[in-house]
Amino acid sequence: MKKQIRKAIAFILSAIGTVAMIYVSGYLMLVQPIIQLYQAFRGDGITALLLFVSFIKIFLCTTMAGAIWCFFDIAAGF
């Protein structure tokens, strides 16, 4: 019984890590900056700062995804 509970907790942590990875790196760091850039471009309000910050977010989104996934995978391994 104790082994089943540990496996269930590990599975839940792994699932939470996957969902958090998709939300943070997929939406917050990839999709949202692209949408902001598009809206700023359409409204003639694009600035160098917005372009720079969006580029950094887009560039680092895969690194953040790996970090989140690794953290929750290590937590699930305990």
Image (cartoon, rainbow, N blue to C red):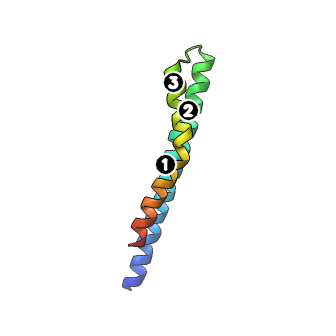
| Quadrant housing the N terminus | bottom left
Give the distance between the C-alpha atoms of the residues marked 3 and 2, in whole angstroms.
8 Å
* Amino acid type, label 2: Phe
Image position, residue 59 (x, y; %): 56, 39
Q: Extreme bottom residue here?
A: 1
Query: Residue 17: where, in percent of width, then height?
Result: 47, 58
Task: Say whether disc 1 or disc 2 marks the residue closer to the N-terminus.
Answer: 2
- Proximity of marks 1 and 3: CB atoms separated by less than 8 Å: no
Q: Which residue is mark 2?
A: 55
- In the image, 27 versus 77, the foreground residue is 77
| Element at label 2 | helix
Q: Which residue is farthest top?
A: 44
Q: Is residue 77 above or below residue 32?
A: below
Label 1 element class: helix
Residue at 49% in and 48% down: 64
Quadrant where the image shows the C terminus: bottom left
User: Disc 3 designates what residue?
Assistant: 50
- Checking the image for residue 64, the label placed there is 1
Three-letter amino acid code at the position of disc 3: Leu
